[in-house]
Image (cartoon, rainbow, N blue to C red):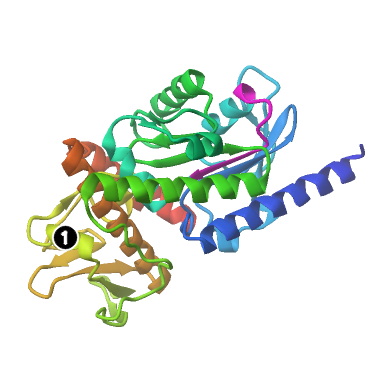
Amino acid sequence: MSLEKLKQKDLKLGEEIIELAHVLTAKGLVVRTWGNFSRRVDSKSILITPSGKAYDKMSPDDLVKIDLSGSKAEVVSPGKPSSEMPMHALSYQLYPDVNVIIHTHQIFASAISLYGRSFPLTEEYAAGFGSDSLELSPYNLPGSSRLHKNMKATMEKSYGKVILMERHGAFILASTMEEAIARAELLEKFSREIFTELTGKESSWRSDIHLNFADEEPAKHSMDSKSKEEVCVYSRDPLIQDFLKSGLSTYLDDFAQICGPTVKDRRKRNSVVFDPVEGRARCYGRDEADARNVRAVLEKNARAAHVAGISKQKPIAGWEARLMRFIYRTKYSKVAE
């Protein structure tokens, strides 16, 4: 095959990955830059989404090609791949029948990862997930080698096609794009059922992060302390009400990054501040879309905190939460811009 035809093939596969991201975004299973996706090109290479690029601004040329033929995965095209690339590369080597991998931070799958153990599955879910149990890969810092080693051990243990990542999200393997979407949706259905069973609370959520509830005020535009424009959106989500007076610690790693290590009634450098008198949270961003992303992560972490209360799981260590916030503010968010 000529170099031109090889390039055209990569671009076409890149278009498929971006379309997959758009579908998952529309279904509320991923938000903005969070999560990552990859596609097998052939037995020796894959394409993966780049680090920090919003899906609605991504083009096929942004996808990063990875060579798997050596002892270590190697970047062979311009661009910086997702920090979870080693996890994707390992999975393609362990699962010859897998052609598509999606890593999501979907709401209820992330929340039930705070249960701290695997879940036995009924026949319906076992068939959909490719395993008799939904395994949980132990927590470590995002993008770290220890996180990838934990995933390797979990995959070699179960060889299931759906794995929860503790305090982080889900890792889903499939033979086709359609199968990947179906598994992500099935996982969220299962996770909502488990959430209600564990907590006794309704598994309600914003079907669209742009949706305001009837009692929530419209977005407010203002200037921050550095005379830069910022936008505030409000949350009166029922599942944050328990934390408005006591504060909310970090149970999910993206909460630390996007919202702040611990959210209370003083903002400091956080993106969220609680207002217990008014019964709401104020969520800040550079623009309205950014502020709504902050709100989505806040509400997801509140659900994780409710599960942690049942399973007696402690918050992420303060120093880790502060480190993740620092890295996000100084590096990742600048890439995203």
Residue furthest toward the right? 2
Quadrant of res 168 = top left
Percent x, y for residue 114? 28, 39
Label 1 CA crowd tier, 10 Å (few <14, some 14–19, many 20+): few
- Please name the residue that numbered disc 1 is placed on: 268
Q: Is residue 51 visible?
A: no
Q: Is residue 269 left or right of residue 257?
A: left
Q: Is residue 158 left or right of residue 320?
A: right
Percent x, y for residue 210? 41, 72
Against 225, residue 162 (above or below) is: above
Quadrant of res 323 = top left
Residue at x 42%, y 66% (from the top left corner): 207
Q: Nearer the viewer, residue 109 or 18?
A: 109
Against 120, residue 55 (above or below) is: below
Total label count?
Answer: 1
Percent x, y for residue 332? 42, 49
Percent x, y for residue 326? 30, 47
Residue at x 13%, y 58% (from the top left corner): 242
Q: Is residue 188 magenta?
A: no
Q: Nearer the viewer, residue 17 or 171?
A: 171
Q: Quadrant of the N terminus?
A: top right
Q: Nearer the viewer, residue 311 or 34?
A: 311
The kind of secondary structure element at disc 1 is loop
User: Range of the magenta residues?
Assistant: 93-103
Q: Is residue 292 left or right of residue 89?
A: left
Quadrant of res 151 = top left
Q: Is residue 97 magenta?
A: yes
Against 210, residue 189 (above or below) is: above
Residue at x 51%, y 29% (from the top left corner): 131
Going by the numbered disc 1, the residue's amino acid type is Lys
Q: Is residue 118 visible?
A: yes
